[in-house]
Amino acid sequence: MNRWFAQVGTPLASTESEALHALIGSDPLLAGARILPVTSWQEASDIARAMDADALWWDHEEAERERLWGIAADRLGESELLQLLTTVETEHGTVPPAVAAAAARANFAADAAIRDASGAVLLAAHQNALATIAGADAGHVFLRKYALFADGRWPLGYHHGSYVIF
């Protein structure tokens, strides 16, 4: 069962720290990154906006998504792949209300940040599905990132030498 955003802002459990170290170890760009936990919606929102201005992580993930897309399309064909990925959005319809509820519990009401967080889950869900369809191994960075979301965190990604987690 997914616990969308149930753990944001709380201290990292040892199992979460281990999962983050495994994620960092699964991607060459992340080599040497430190873990940077953020503790508030405002801080997460500010970092997400700063990350948008610095496209390094986005470009890196997009290159991996394109690589996996090619593998998955070769396996299934474009039409079937698109059909499978389209179902991901329907399957994640409970995310926006869960994000809004988590933000409300923290007395945070910035609609843009709530939309950003919801979109981040949907992107991670697409990446997760694509990695699975492409036959990526269980340690793939996209699978690990999605697992953090499903466990209640918001993994924002790589920013200035750190992997940021809320």
Image: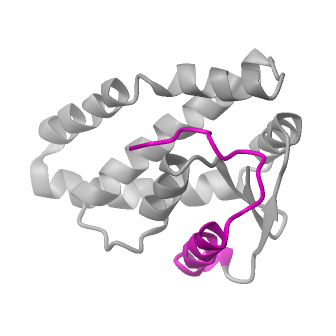
Q: Is residue 69 left or right of residue 30?
A: left
Measured from the top left, where is residue 110 in percent x and y? 80, 19
- Residue 79 vs 1, above or below: the answer is above
Disc tally is 0
Residue 100 falls in which quadrant of the image? top right
Between 66 and 2, the residue placed more toward the observer is 2
Query: In the rendered view of the protein, which quadrant contains the N terminus?
Result: top left
Q: Is residue 68 left or right of residue 65?
A: left
Residue shown at the point (60%, 76%) measured from the top left? 18
Measured from the top left, where is residue 118 in percent x and y? 58, 29
Between 109 and 130, the residue placed more toward the observer is 109
Q: Name the colouring of the figure.
A: one colour
Measured from the top left, where is residue 115 in percent x and y? 65, 23
Residue shown at the point (42%, 61%) measured from the top left? 143
Residue 16 falls in which quadrant of the image? bottom right
- Whether residue 116 appears in magenta in the rendering, the answer is no
- Residue 150 vs 119, above or below: the answer is below
Measured from the top left, where is residue 138 in percent x and y? 34, 72
Q: Which residues are magenta?
A: 1-30
- Residue 93 vs 162, above or below: the answer is above
Residue shown at the point (63%, 51%) measured from the top left? 58
Q: Is residue 90 left or right of residue 23?
A: left
Between 69 and 102, the residue placed more toward the observer is 102
Residue shown at the point (81%, 63%) measured from the top left? 36
- Residue 36 vs 129, above or below: the answer is below
Between 53 and 135, the residue placed more toward the observer is 135
- Whether residue 26 appears in magenta in the rendering, the answer is yes
Q: Is residue 152 left or right of residue 122?
A: right
